């Protein structure tokens, strides 16, 4: 049991796990910023373009609700297309912002291209085979000239 605990501690304090945890926390906060950007900055102009209706209110009613008096006998069945479109818009904006962040980070890092490595020295076996090949060529040419 102590071996399992030791392995878990080694796993939990590895750099990758800690980096991932920080990334998840920052990602959650970033998600709130992007949601605010979409809801408070992007959506109001779109609402104006759609004659004042909120995009999240868009729905495709498959069956109207049946109401008797003030009681709902059968609830409405609808596909909430607006909620889906809002999620897609959020995703596109988040993906674009992350793309731009990564592009900026890569520009900042801008590592020098690695210099090509010099070809490795041939092994002893390869050198020996090349010598044998040359000797055989020489023997063959000597036979042709005799």
Image: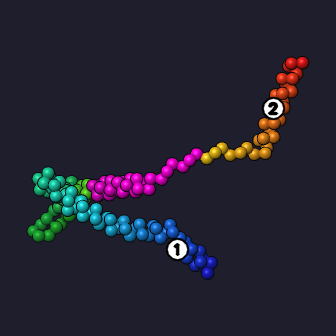
Residue 124 at x, y = what percent? 78, 45
| Residue 95 visible in image | no
Circles 1 and 2: CB atoms closer than 8 Å? no
Residue 53 at x, y = what percent? 14, 57
- Residue 71 inside the magenta-drawn segment: no
Q: How is the image coloured?
A: rainbow
Q: Quadrant of the C terminus?
A: top right
Q: Quadrant of residue 119?
A: top right
Is residue 1 or residue 98 the one in the foreground? 98
| Residue 122 visible in image | yes
Q: Residues within 10 Å of mark 2 (few under 14, many from 20)?
A: few
Left or right of residue 21: residue 96:
left
Q: Furthest-left residue in view?
A: 69
Q: Furthest-bottom residue in view?
A: 2
- Residues in magenta? 88-116
Query: Mark 1 or 2 closer to N-term?
Result: 1
Is residue 89 or residue 138 the one in the foreground? 138
Instruction: Estimate the spatial distance between the alpha carbons at disc 1 and disc 2, rounded to whole Å.
Output: 59 Å
Q: Residues within 10 Å of mark 1 (few under 14, many from 20)?
A: few
Q: Tell me the residue that label 1 is attached to.
A: 13
**Overall secondary structure of the magenta section:** helix
Q: Residue at x 52, y 73 (%)?
A: 12
Q: Residue at x 14, y 51 (%)?
A: 49
Q: Secondary structure at mark 2?
A: helix
Q: Which mark is residue 3?
A: none
Q: Residue at x 42, y 69 (%)?
A: 22
- Residue 97 inside the magenta-drawn segment: yes
Q: Quadrant of residue 47?
A: bottom left
Q: Tell me the residue that label 2 is attached to.
A: 134
Is residue 15 or residue 39 the one in the foreground? 15
Q: Residue at x 51, y 48 (%)?
A: 113
Left or right of residue 121: residue 28:
left
């Amino acid at each position: 049991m102590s071996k399992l605990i030791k392995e878990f501690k080694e796993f939990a304090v590895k750099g990758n796990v800690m980096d991932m945890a920080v990334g998840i926390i920052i990602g959650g906060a970033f998600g709130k910023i992007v949601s605010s950007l979409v809801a408070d900055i992007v959506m109001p102009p779109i609402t104006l373009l759609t004659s004042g209706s909120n995009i999240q209110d868009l729905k495709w009613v498959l069956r109207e609700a049946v109401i008797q008096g003030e009681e709902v006998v059968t609830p409405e069945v609808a596909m909430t297309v607006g909620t889906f479109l809002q999620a897609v818009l959020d995703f596109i904006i988040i993906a674009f912002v992350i793309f731009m962040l990564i592009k900026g980070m890569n520009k900042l890092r801008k590592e020098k291209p690695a210099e090509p490595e010099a070809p490795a020295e041939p092994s002893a076996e390869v050198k020996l085979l090349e010598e044998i090949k040359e000797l055989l060529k020489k023997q063959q040419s000597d036979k042709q000239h005799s």
